[in-house]
Image (spheres, helix red, strand yellow):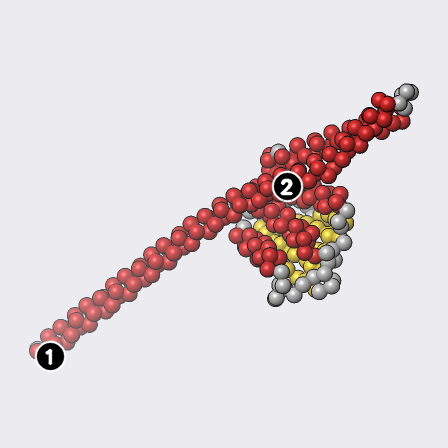
Amino acid sequence: MQEQSYQIVTGVVITIIIFLLIGFFILVLIAYFNNRKKKFYEEKQTLQQQYTEQLLKSQLEMQEQTFNTISREIHDNVGQILSLAKVQLNIIDQSETLDKTMLADAKDSVSKAMTDLRDIAKSLNSERIQLASLPEMAGHELQRISRTGIMLASLRTEGDEQNIESEKKLIVFRIIQESLQNIIKHSKASSVNLCFFYNSDHLKIEIADNGTGFDTDISKDKKAGLGLQNIISRAALIGGEASVNSIIDKGTTITITTPYA
């Protein structure tokens, strides 16, 4: 009888211990998942904050670059054209007879200046970035590069063009701008090719130049190295990735991939 009672008590104690262990294990799991959940939301909030900051930074950088470009174009292009038109009109004014050929040339100069000013006005319109496609905006940048005579610039698009989120498009365009600026400043290239590959679930962009190239592991130019790191970090922030492949004396290719949404 005592032995049976002992067995019952022992069984009850063991059962209680098992339930206590199970309860403790459940509490540990709950604490663990709550901690993971908290970290997840904190990381998500941090990423969202970084994304918002990067978006604002991209907007400000694009505005600054646009104003710098406008300043150069007014000084280098529009200013020179209008100066030429002024000289032509002065010659006509001083001539005793009307030179219709000179007058036509002056009219062409004024017309060209007006066209350039309209293009500048378009670049000031923020809605243009929202409404235009990435190839259209990139093509405008390449035209600017070609007009300087620094290098030949070409654009190619493959696949059916697809829409991309406006915020993401802004950051992608800024990555393209920054890549082109790096090429102009550091590559000593004579040509640059920009290609858009529209795949079913992601967009792939390749920016290739025929410049001096560099060692991707050890960048001698700290500013260039920081610029490339900035490109890579921005691509990661929008759920994509960027890679840099460079061969000394043969050129550099920057590849960017990103989902559409």
- Residue 199 seen anywhere in this rendered image of the structure: no
Kind of element beneath mark 2: helix
Q: Which mark is residue 130?
A: none
Mark pair 1, 2: CA separation? 95 Å
Q: What's the residue type where badge 2 is placed?
A: Asn
Query: Which is nearer the eye, 153 or 108?
Result: 108
Q: Quadrant of the N terminus?
A: bottom left
Query: Which is nearer the eye, 78 or 87?
Result: 87
Identify which residue is drawn at 25% across, 63% down.
23
Query: Which is nearer the eye, 79 or 219?
Result: 79
The correct choice, above or below, for 228 with respect to 96 in the image is below
* Left or right, residue 101 beside residue 243: right
Given contact means CB atoms under 8 Å apart, are the residues at marks 1 and 2 in contact? no
Kind of element beneath mark 1: helix
Q: Which mark is residue 3?
A: 1
Identify which residue is drawn at 52% across, 52% down.
237
- Crowding at dot 1, Cα within 10 Å, few <14 / some 14-19 / many 20+, comes out as few
Q: Position of residue 53 (x, y in %)?
A: 49, 46
The correct choice, above or below, for 216 with respect to 169 in the image is below
Q: What's the residue type where badge 1 is placed?
A: Glu
* Left or right, residue 180 beside residue 111: left
Q: Position of residue 64 (x, y in %)?
A: 59, 42
Q: Quarter-wise, where is residue 187 in the image?
A: bottom right
Q: Position of residue 63 (x, y in %)?
A: 59, 40
Q: Position of residue 85 (x, y in %)?
A: 80, 29
Q: Earlier in the sequence, mark 1 or mark 2?
A: 1
Which circle, 1 or 2, is nearer the viewer? 2
Residue that extends furthest to the right in the rendered view of this protein: 97
User: Which residue is label 2 attached to?
Assistant: 68
